[in-house]
């Protein structure tokens, strides 16, 4: 009897060790099912007409997005929310598409995407009206560029905020130095896919570390037909640097992506 009890005790311990070694379930990986998802009534994707290159002010809010203006930039003279009409059209389309298609996805907070810097009213760089442009030359000029937050999880909203650790020993590095913890890679990838439906979206710059989960989600959403085939074929327009090769994507994209329109 004592012998049997000893065996039972050993078996229990072995079982406990085995159970302990079974990895705990992975962090919630949404089961999104096959695309392309629900039918959606969306705003136009492509600008049609003679005034598509005109610089216009982005409406403050629309389906799936909100444009949060900075203090001191809330009048047309000081606003940094001006962009080409054709770029505005595709951004509004992509925001509305994510809001509708991903309505039930459990991968993030599900809120509206927040828009950041575009250009000033005369097409110059944000900050130029006070003599202090906050972007490098050649970017955010002529309403051809827009900064947009990442879709996030474990946050209340999708404001432009860092999605990862970006400081080391108190030093700001302006890039992710660890995998992002606040990124909703699924909605972000769906949004990028919607933008890339438009052939004149030249490049979408993201953080080099955030690119890994974003591209993995993008590939899966292509395989499952959530993202259009034509957009999947433009995957190489998603730009990032994992080391500083001087292309300008290495720093500054830990809290937003940068969408750039074809320059002609
Ligand atoms: Zn930018």
Image (tube, rainbow, N blue to C red):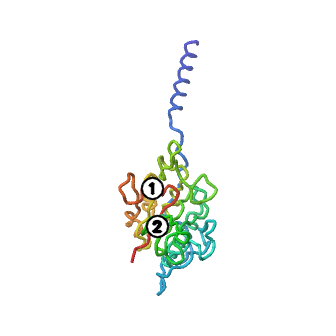
Residue 179, label in figure: none
Kindly tell me whether residue 145 is visible in this rendering.
Answer: yes
Mark 2, secondary structure of its residue = strand
Residue labelled with disc 1: 251
> Residue 23: percent from the left, percent from the top?
51, 38
Label 2, label 1: how far apart the Cα atoms are: 15 Å
Placement of 149 over or under 26, stated as above or below: below
* Position of residue 57 measured from the top left corner of the image (x, y, whole percent): 56, 77
What residue is disc 2 on? 259
Would you say the residues marked 2 and 1 are in contact, meaning their CB atoms lie under 8 Å apart?
Answer: no
Q: Residue furthest left?
A: 245
Nearest the viewer among 142 and 14 is 142
Secondary structure of the residue carrying tag 1 is loop
Give the label, 2 or 1, closer to the camera. Answer: 1
Q: Residue furthest bottom?
A: 50
Snapshot quadrant of residue 5: top right
Furthest toward the top, the residue is 2
Task: Mark 2: give few (<14), some (14-19) or many (20+) Cα within 10 Å.
Answer: many
Query: In the figure, 26 relative to 61: above or below?
Result: above
Nearest to the observer: residue 219 or residue 123: 123
Residue 226, can we see it? no
**Label 1 neighbourhood size at 10 Å, few (<14), some (14-19), many (20+)?**
some
């Amino acid at each position: 009897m004592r012998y049997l009890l000893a065996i039972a005790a050993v078996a229990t311990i072995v079982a406990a060790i085995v159970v302990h070694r079974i990895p705990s379930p992975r962090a919630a990986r949404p089961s999104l099912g096959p695309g392309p998802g629900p039918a959606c009534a969306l705003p136009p994707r492509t600008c049609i007409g003679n005034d598509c290159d005109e610089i216009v002010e982005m409406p403050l809010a629309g389906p799936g997005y909100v444009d949060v203006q900075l203090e001191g930039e809330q009048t047309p003279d000081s606003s940094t929310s001006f962009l080409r009409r054709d770029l505005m059209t595709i951004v509004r389309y992509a925001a509305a598409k994510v809001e509708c298609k991903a309505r039930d996805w459990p991968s993030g907070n599900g809120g509206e995407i927040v828009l950041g810097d575009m250009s000033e009213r005369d097409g110059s760089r944000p900050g130029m009206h006070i003599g202090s442009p906050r972007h490098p030359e050649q970017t955010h000029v002529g309403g051809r560029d827009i900064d947009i937050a990442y879709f996030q999880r474990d946050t209340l909203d999708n404001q432009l905020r860092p999605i990862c650790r970006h400081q080391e020993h108190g030093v700001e590095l302006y890039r992710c130095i660890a995998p992002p913890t606040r990124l909703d890679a699924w909605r972000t990838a769906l949004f990028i896919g919607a933008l890339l439906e438009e052939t004149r979206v030249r490049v979408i710059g993201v953080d080099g570390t955030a690119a890994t989960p974003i591209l993995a989600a993008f590939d899966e959403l292509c395989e499952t037909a959530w993202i259009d085939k034509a957009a999947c074929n433009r995957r190489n327009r998603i730009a990032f640097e994992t080391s500083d090769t001087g292309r300008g994507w290495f720093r500054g994209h830990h809290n937003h992506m940068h969408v750039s329109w074809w320059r002609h």
